[in-house]
Image (cartoon, rainbow, N blue to C red):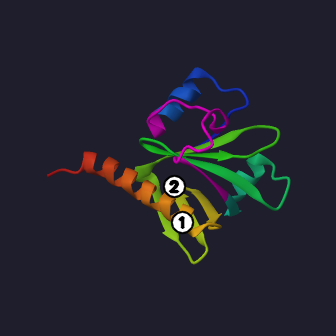
Amino acid sequence: MLFNLSNPDTAMLSQIRDLVGSALVSPDKISPSNPNIQVFTLIDVDDEIIAIINKQSDVINCKIEIRKQGLLIWLGVSEELAVLAFPYWLISLFKGADYLQLYCQSWRLKLLIQDKNESQKFQQNFLQRRAIIQSQYDIY
């Protein structure tokens, strides 16, 4: 789900917390060395995302934060900050030669792989977190 954070209210913050499992904290207030946050370049996104963030250049960077129950994708917008919040169980991840694609319901993001090691760490963290969440719902 896409949230415009220019004027967040309690209900919105509660909804984000329910999706990703922890309270919302801006990545600018988190240590830059935090291994749970990685910067990616978006090379293809849904038209709806482009319209919402009012793309001002050909390159959009985003910060992806791995949370307990889902991903927060911080969209770098000069005027307004927006975040996508996806629970792990709704996300599909596909890897190409030089990109990753994330799908969640109707949302699609194509991320450029600039550093293969960082991308691999992200994929491992993502898959581990998703496996933990999935194991909590498995019926034996």
Estimate the x, y position of residue 129 in percent, counting from the top left: 39, 50
Q: Position of residue 69 (x, y in %)?
A: 42, 42
Amino acid under disc 2 = Gln
Name the residue located 56 percent from the left edge and 28 percent from the top edge: 13
The one nearer the camera, 51 or 72, is 72
Looking at the image, residue 2 lies above or below residue 18: below
Taking the image as shown, residue 140 lies to the left or right of residue 44, namely: left
Q: Residue furthest right?
A: 56
Residue at the location (49% across, 60% down)? 121
1 and 2 marks in contact (CB < 8 Å): no
| Residue position for label 1 | 117
* Amino acid type, mark 1: Asn
Q: Quadrant of residue 41?
A: bottom right
User: Observer-nearest residue: 28 or 126?
Assistant: 28
- Are there few (<14), some (14-19), or many (20+) residues within 10 Å of tag 1? few
Secondary structure at numbered mark 1? helix
